[in-house]
Image (cartoon, grey):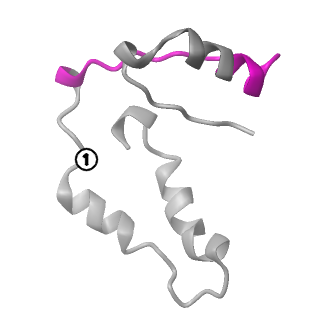
Amino acid sequence: MTSVISIFANDLDERLIRELKARFGNSRLDITVADKSDYAGLPQETFWTLIDLLAWDQHTDQATVAPLVTALQAFDAVAI
């Protein structure tokens, strides 16, 4: 299972490192540094296009969000 954790560098402290080690133990961590000046944000039109992918006619939460999750996989984590 892949997890994405977004934090500000200033929030990184010994407590958080201990929590990450306890939770992810032997897992590999890939750290991507995203400078805020490099990203202007998700355009509003793109946001609403993604929201429109929610399948509200489905009977489970997983089925409702499945099309959105699939579309989000095409984005870089920083862009989301």
Q: Pick the residue in front: 47 or 4.
A: 4
What residue sits 40% from the left and 19% below the top?
11
Q: Is residue 43 magenta?
A: no
Q: Image height check: is 16 above or below 61? A: above
Q: Quadrant of the N terminus?
A: top right
Give the x, y percent position of residue 37: 17, 21
Q: Residue at x 63, y 36 (%)?
A: 3
Q: Going 49% across and 57% down the picture, which residue do you hit?
A: 71
The answer to whether residue 23 is left or right of residue 43 is right
* Quadrant location, the C terminus: top left
Would you say the magenta stretch is mainly helix, strand or loop? loop
Asked if 66 appears above or below 37 in the picture, the reply is: below
Give 21 or 59, whichever is nearer the viewer. 21
Q: Is residue 34 left or right of residue 6?
A: left
Residue 15: image location, x then y, percent: 58, 15
Across and down, in percent, residue 7 comes to 43, 26
Q: Quadrant of residue 67?
A: bottom right
> Which residue reaches farthest top?
14
- Quarter-of-image position of residue 77: top left
Residue 50 location (% of width, % of height):
37, 64
The region drawn magenta spans 20-37
Disc 1: which residue: 42
Q: In this view of the protein, which residue sits in the foreground, 66 or 7? A: 7
